[in-house]
Amino acid sequence: MTDGERPNLLFIMSDDHAAHAISAYGSRINQTPHLDRIAANGMRFDAAFCTNSICSPSRASILTGTYNHVNGVTTLDTTLDNTLWTFPQALQEAGYVTGLIGKWHLGHGPGADPAGFDFWRVLPGQGHYTNPVMLEEGGTVVERAGYVTDLITEDCIDFIDEHGDRPFALFCHHKAAHRHWEPAARHFTAFDDTDIPEPETFWDDLEGRAEVIKAVKMHMMDLDPITDLKALVPEGLTREEEIEWRYQRYIKDYLRVVAAMDEGIGRLLDKLEADGLSDNTIVVYTSDQGFFLGDHGWFDKRLMYEESLAMPLLIQYPAQVKAGSTCDDIVVNVDFGPTLLDLMGVEIPDDVQGRSFAPLLDGERPEDWPESMYYRYWMHRDGEHNTPAHYGVRTKTHKLICYYNDPLDQLGANGPTDPIEWELFDLVNDPLELRNVIEDPGYATVRGELEAELAWLQAEVGDEPYPGAEL
Ligand code: CA
């Protein structure tokens, strides 16, 4: 490709934004008109999954195109070795001007600072919603006045102003919608006059699920009234009323921070249009993982249940992607980098584990496209959420999860080791994952097939089964 033919990339990634809080995905609780523009102009992926549902590991998988046992970022306490190959660095080497603005969350300082970017300005760790400090090359501290989502948006607009005349790859990484969900002042009263509907599984009693799932500390009652809900619990509520009150406090702030982000994304899309760049720019919207929005009574992520496993993924690229199209083939976060390199005419190294799904964007499904995906969460009992270490397989119709329940000396994982437990869900007849059928004799054949698929996937990606974890 010549410079004139090379597409630009605007890669927008948010934090903890679940697909079911995007109206293009049929949200029952909010409207996201600008994200919907990307869906209307491009393709919506309905089966995009992360391979480990927490921030740093998913980000590492996206950048390196590898699973966490390969790139080493297994938990929130691990950092990304910045000498590893990443796809932004490949774009830079291919002549793109590259920029990263916003959340990094893969470590700081020599060995861990962002690499492969001509310009970067990132939040330290999680950063702050208001008046955030940001870091640049060499550890330079930049003090910013304003609301983080707006500042990231404005920096991205400045980057396009400065570099829009040559092929660019810009990574806009929002802090939103991460805990503690602090809205912009203009959204303080949004949703005040309405009750947000509770999800269908809000009162799930978790009967029949693994014991370690029943012990997870991600319930409405585990939210901190002061830091998360910014209020004192009203006196005189029954337990049920308090749970409902907590949900409203939580979800409204969540949706308020999403609203600011959606506005910012609209400004970026307007900027591309105003500068005549829309036709030749690939616009990606995703989030590092999904999130529980009261589903099963929970907030947060980490588990292999659908709301946490699923990533929103919208891709607009008029030259190649049909407007208003959808795709229900399984794609995973390790595939993102190779796909974009493929679209941008840059070579994909052999040791990248992900596979380009550019043909799916063309509406062409390769005959051997995967029918399943592999997931692994390493951070056993992190000390706060009490989520168990597990791995599993999801096909288009079923999900098998092995809670092997061992910290395995992973940074940030803790004991004790719990007995191994299994869950099996029939996603066709039980899409809400309410009935664990692992012991159901009617599922013996499916169970055997999924167990074989899991073993095959582990061998395929080079991961090791947990000793003694056989059904
Ligand atoms: Ca996240």
Image (cartoon, grey):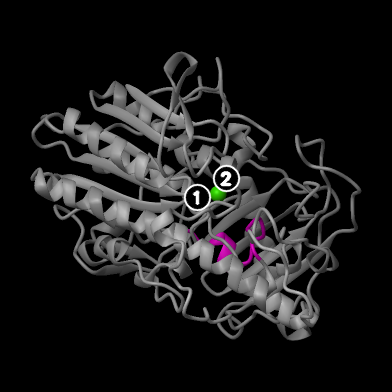
Q: Which residue is mark 1?
A: 15
Relative to 88, 2 lies left or right:
left
Q: Which residue is mark 2?
A: 55
Q: CA distance from mark 2 to mark 1?
A: 7 Å
Q: Amino acid at mark 2?
A: Cys
> From the viewer's perspective, is residue 55 above or below residue 169?
below
Residue 1 x %, y %: 14, 33
Our reading of the magenta stretch's main secondary structure is loop
**The magenta stretch spans residue 305:** yes
Q: Are marks 2 and 1 in contact (CB under 8 Å)?
A: yes
Residue 124 x %, y %: 54, 31
Mark 2 or mark 1, earlier in chain: 1
Q: Amino acid at mark 1?
A: Asp
Q: Residue at x 64, y 49 (%)?
A: 458
Q: Quadrant of residue 111?
A: top right
Q: Residue at x 40, y 67 (%)?
A: 22
